[in-house]
């Protein structure tokens, strides 16, 4: 062994031991029982199992399990069983050891968690055909066995995100996208607030490095100003709380770069117009756990004598915790500088739960505030119900699950005054299904606050909802459109499917009888003849039509079936398109149109003008132009579709078909033109439109293609479509338009609408 190699090995060894020592220190400082021995055993075992293997970053592999265990311990608050499982989480996946080996050495509990983690490990970093949705389903299923599996999985993902820099770019997008789509909402749902925020920020940083840096820079530039606002605002509060003899600390909560960016995107506003970057957190230590809630409200009352509270913005998560366990009292107060500031009041216990989530509950099991305990179980039950209903399409499944992960919540009341938590945007129909499937499937309408409303009526927090039913009511296909919760959607589609199946069966039976009577053979060929005759796409469609009596087999059917097949075979018309298309037509096309085989997905693909015109398709959903952060996706027809990285569809693709992603880079220069849409809003004055068009056409080579302007009550709104070369062109135009005095909003939008 060379000297250098030896030195490297010693340095590695030292790093490993330091990492492990730090883990032990955090564990010893925690409130858990001290089981050092088994943790050390797990560490030594994992260390020798991964011996000699390095991560892409060059670090010894074992540093990863150590880091995951560290997160599980100090950021999620888990105990020795989870720490051991985290240390061992990649052993079965990456080495020859089996789950049995783990069980023999560490007992059934740890082995079971490692087994769960191994089952859901595939595809994340590997090149295996990505069936992420399938994988995710497994992940949720293991959650029912032991919630610690998913908590450790989130820790694993967090560490992978923290070290994402050393991955290939196309892998980065896949992992970042998946994280944003699934893991961050999941962390949120489990109450891991801090981790959720970090996951979002890291994803954002990798997908939009420039915008991330810009927001960071702006946060830095405005830091001093915020600090002085914070001090001015909190000084009188401190004085008041001191007088009351409360033990407390006050902290500034700064909005995360991702949330800021998200708000800028969805509200179409610049950084300077985001007014809730600073919020204030009052965290207190109650004199006694019994008076914890009372103290929250006492603090609220006393500080609202200093600043006027916003009448519509009191949020009582103290008496009605969110279903992820979150508890706090949120109020919004008017500062002396004329700016609304949100104040979050919570006890130390509530704060632990807010930051560490579910696991923090365990620490307080015997303490106060226990009635929210059931919410997580309720949620898990919903997830299980969805999983029990097989969803044919992986993407559908993801959508359904996501509805459940993302939703923020409202409170509604039953006629008897019972409180029910529902996702935001829930309809009366959702409410009916949330109470009972029978109520949902026989629902004809509802009374909201004693007024009659349709099933599609959107509920608001505080509504009292009474469901009206009728025995003769049946689930209607259109209901799918106004059901928004996962539960209602999956129930409705299950019932519809069941009904469809029984109709098909009935139709098939009728047809069989007809065949028997006419002494015909019930063969696929014969069925197909009837499909052709009645223009049914599938035999199933034909059966349903027969059951519904829109088709009654008769003379015409008989004569078609009894006629000898001739050269004029009706089959031909119904050969599915791809067979005809690919085999006969495509071969005649020039070979150069099939570029994909040559593409090396490990490299960054350059989007040159030639390449774009030939082989690439600009996605219509998000309409990216040069300068936008983009990625490529190889579709089923082997074409490369270019999406914006934040495109909702692209996010879904990242999660479901991550292995078809390509890292791409614009290399178009100024040679191509792309359509782009801009939204403008301002005060209506004479000659304004003139100013607008002048500015745009002054910009070299930018042509206006379409304009739609609408003026109402002195305010005008409009959409402009124009041709530009790249994002720089758009930015220049937007900046110039913003300089017009009467102009209030100018932003780029995706769709041109002629009804703003
Ligand atoms: Mn791992």
Image (cartoon, rainbow, N blue to C red):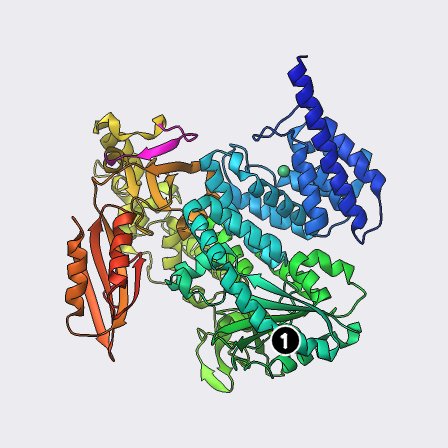
Which span of residues is magenta-colored? 599-609
Residue toward you, 66 or 439 = 66
Residue toward you, 480 or 78 = 78
Q: Is residue 553 left or right of residue 492?
A: left
Q: Looking at the image, which residue is at 33% across and 51% down?
A: 622
- The reply to whether residue 468 is visible in this rendering is yes
Q: Is residue 411 left or right of residue 221?
A: right
Q: Position of residue 166 (x, y in %)?
A: 53, 34
Q: Is residue 695 above or below residue 304?
A: above
Q: Which residue is mark 1?
A: 237
Residue ranking furthest to the bottom:
450
Numbered circles on residues, count:
1
Q: Is residue 363 above or below residue 143?
A: below
Q: Quadrant of the N terminus?
A: top right
Q: Position of residue 204 (x, y in %)?
A: 47, 49
- Tell me which corner region of the image, top left, top right, bottom left or bottom right, holds residue 679: bottom left
Q: Position of residue 372 (x, y in %)?
A: 69, 68
Q: Quadrant of the C terminus?
A: bottom left
Q: Looking at the image, which residue is at 33% across and 45% down?
A: 528
């Amino acid at each position: 062994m060379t000297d250098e190699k030896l030195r490297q090995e010693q340095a590695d060894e030292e790093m490993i031991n330091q990492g492990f020592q730090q883990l032990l220190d955090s564990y010893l400082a925690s409130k858990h029982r001290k089981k050092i021995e088994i943790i050390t055993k797990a560490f030594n075992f994992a260390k020798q199992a991964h011996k000699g293997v390095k991560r892409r970053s060059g670090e010894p592999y074992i540093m990863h399990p150590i880091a995951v265990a560290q997160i599980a311990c100090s950021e999620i608050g888990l105990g020795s069983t989870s720490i051991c499982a985290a240390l061992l989480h990649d052993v079965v996946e990456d080495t020859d050891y089996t789950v049995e080996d783990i069980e023999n050495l560490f007992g059934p509990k740890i082995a079971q968690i490692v087994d769960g983690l191994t089952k859901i490990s595939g595809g994340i970093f590997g090149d295996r055909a990505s069936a992420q949705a399938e994988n995710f389903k497994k992940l949720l299923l293991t959650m029912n066995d032991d919630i610690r599996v998913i908590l450790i999985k989130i820790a694993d993902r967090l560490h992978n995100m923290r070290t994402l820099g050393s991955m290939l770019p196309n892998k980065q997008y896949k992992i970042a996208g998946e994280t944003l789509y699934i893991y961050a909402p999941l962390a949120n749902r489990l109450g891991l607030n801090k981790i959720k925020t970090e996951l979002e920020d890291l994803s954002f940083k990798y997908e939009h490095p420039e915008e991330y840096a810009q927001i960071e820079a702006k946060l830095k530039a405005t830091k001093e100003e915020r600090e002085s606002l914070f001090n001015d605002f909190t000084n009188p509060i401190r004085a008041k709380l001191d007088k009351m003899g409360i033990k407390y600390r006050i902290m500034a909560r700064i909005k995360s770069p991702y949330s800021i960016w998200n708000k800028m995107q969805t509200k179409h506003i610049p950084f300077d117009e985001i007014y809730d970057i600073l919020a204030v957190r009052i965290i207190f230590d109650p004199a006694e756990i019994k008076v914890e809630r009372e103290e929250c409200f006492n603090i609220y009352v006393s500080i609202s004598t200093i600043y006027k509270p916003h009448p519509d913005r009191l949020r009582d998560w103290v008496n009605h915790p969110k279903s992820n366990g979150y508890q706090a009292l949120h109020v919004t107060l008017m500062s002396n500088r004329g700016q609304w500031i949100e104040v979050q009041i919570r006890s130390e216990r509530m704060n632990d739960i807010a930051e560490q989530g579910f696991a923090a509950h365990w620490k307080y099991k015997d303490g106060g505030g226990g009635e929210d305990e059931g919410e997580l179980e309720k949620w898990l039950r919903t997830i299980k119900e969805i999983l029990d209903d097989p969803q044919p399409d992986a993407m559908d499944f993801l959508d359904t699950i996501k509805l459940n992960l993302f939703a923020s919540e409202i409170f509604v009341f039953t006629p008897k005054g019972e409180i029910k938590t529902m996702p935001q945007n829930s309809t009366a129909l959702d409410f009916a299904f949330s109470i009972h499937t029978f109520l949902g499937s026989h629902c004809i309408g509802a009374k909201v606050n004693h007024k009659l409303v349709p099933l599609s009526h959107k509920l608001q927090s505080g509504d009292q909802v009474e469901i009206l039913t009728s025995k003769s009511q049946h689930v209607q296909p259109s209901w799918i459109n106004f059901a928004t919760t996962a539960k209602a959607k999956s129930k409705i589609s299950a019932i519809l499917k069941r009904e469809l199946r029984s109709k098909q069966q009935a139709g098939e039976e009728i047809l069989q009888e007809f065949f028997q009577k006419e002494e015909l053979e019930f063969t696929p060929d014969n069925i197909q003849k009837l499909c052709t005759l009645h223009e049914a796409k599938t035999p199933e469609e034909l059966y349903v039509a027969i059951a519904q009596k829109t088709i009654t087999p008769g003379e015409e059917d008989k004569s078609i079936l009894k006629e000898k097949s001739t050269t004029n075979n009706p089959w031909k018309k119904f050969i599915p398109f791809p067979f005809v298309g690919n085999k006969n037509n495509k071969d005649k096309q020039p070979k150069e149109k099939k570029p994909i085989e040559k593409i090396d997905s490990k490299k960054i693909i350059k989007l040159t003008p030639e390449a774009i015109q030939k082989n690439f398709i600009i996605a219509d959903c998000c309409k990216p132009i040069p300068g936008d952060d983009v990625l490529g996706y190889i579709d089923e027809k082997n074409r490369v579709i270019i999406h914006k990285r934040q495109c909702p569809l692209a996010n879904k693709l990242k999660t479901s078909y991550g292995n078809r992603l390509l890292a791409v880079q614009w290399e178009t220069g100024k040679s191509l033109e792309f359509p782009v849409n801009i939204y403008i809003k301002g005060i209506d004055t004479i000659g304004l439109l003139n100013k607008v068009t002048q500015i745009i056409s002054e910009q070299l080579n930018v042509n206006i293609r379409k304009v739609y302007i609408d003026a109402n009550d002195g305010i005008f709104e409009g959409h402009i479509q124009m041709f530009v070369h790249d994002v720089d062109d758009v930015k220049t135009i937007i900046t110039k338009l913003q300089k017009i005095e009467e102009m209030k909003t100018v932003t780029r939008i995706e769709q041109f609408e002629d009804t703003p």
